Amino acid sequence: MKAIQITEFGGPEVLQQVELPDPQPGPGEVLIEVSRAGLNYADTHQAENSYLASYQLPLVPGGEVVGRVVGEGRRVVALTPGTGGYAEKAVAPTLTTFDVPDGVDDLTALSLIVQGATAWLLLRKSAHLEPGESVVVHAAAGGVGTIAVQLAKLWGAGRVIATASSDDKRKLALDLGADIAIDSREPEMKDALIEANNGRRVDIVLDMTGGTTTDQSLRALAPFGRLAFYGMASRQRPQPVELGTLLTHSTTIAGMWLPHALKVRDAEHGTLAHRAMAELFQLVVDGKIKAIPGGEYGMGDIRQAHEDLRSRKTQGKLVLDPAR
């Protein structure tokens, strides 16, 4: 089968198209004929070995695929065991394999399994959004951001404040339901967020930027405000937080990493991730949320895909077509 493999860690230059034997599923796993694989910003960290999990070489990057189960024909979207997605065939645990309902296309299924589930978890579990609260969505034109804007409005946010780096991205956020969109490069982000909230401090910030954006967002929070932190796209660490300073505005800082949702049990759906996916699928089928296409790449374009991800010029969901 065709696959993308890396034999050393580094930037986009380490991604190589190769021929590999088909992977073999073990107990509790399925083999999937991949129609599309998801491309995520986290994949650039995986290639560098700078992600939360560490990896062994050689490896096939990619953590999410959509396609049909070999021998069954079931159409599924799945999380691979951290690697293996950039290939014509991939193995995934049954626990992280979800049947795709009719009416949900490949792009949308891939948009939901990582970005959609992340947005759901940030708002439902990390930030505990209540109706009427203000929500800041940083990187609002990205995969998580486009879903988060829609969910926040759907779930009753009083004011959704989007940040994005270009006019086109800010327009997209407004089209998806944001009440106001501001430049993510604003040097005084704290003041910009408060001004965007009509002079009031904000209740919730969803942040995957890091660095000064996180520092200033934290200072913009209202009493009992929550900052839900889920990445560092800037590759810059925020300033350390002294616990005593959290008392100043009764502030909460929550971290979120998606794999933990597969370990938390849910009485009705099995795991928290299954609950999130069931609700997200239904919202798509009901026409209440939608995925935003961000670009499709072939195997020969994979380095360009990672360059585009790293440049943070993309918007919506990016996918890889292993047949190209």
Image (spheres, rainbow, N blue to C red):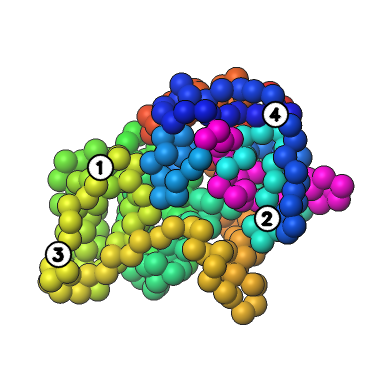
Q: Name the residue under label 1.
A: 236
- Nearer the N terminus, badge 4 or badge 1? 4
The residues bearing labels 4 and 2 have C-alpha atoms spaced at a distance of 20 Å
Single out the mark in the foreground, 2 or 1.
2
The disc labelled 3 sits on which kind of residue?
A: Glu
The disc labelled 2 sits on which kind of residue?
A: Pro
**Residue 69 visible, this orientation:** yes
**Counting other residues with Cα less than 10 Å from the Cα at mark 4, is it few (<14), some (14-19), or many (20 or more)?**
some
The magenta span reads: 57-82
The residues bearing labels 2 and 3 have C-alpha atoms spaced at a distance of 40 Å
Single out the mark in the foreground, 4 or 1.
4
Q: Name the residue under label 2.
A: 93
Residue 160, given in percent of the width and then of the height, sits at 36, 57
**Counting other residues with Cα less than 10 Å from the Cα at mark 2, is it few (<14), some (14-19), or many (20 or more)?**
some
Q: Mark 3 points at which residue?
A: 242
Q: Mark 4 points at which residue?
A: 20
* Dot 3: element: loop
**Residue 38: quarter of image:** top right
The residues bearing labels 3 and 4 have C-alpha atoms spaced at a distance of 50 Å
Residue 268, given in percent of the width and then of the height, sits at 65, 77
Q: Which residue is at the front of the view, 171 or 71?
A: 71
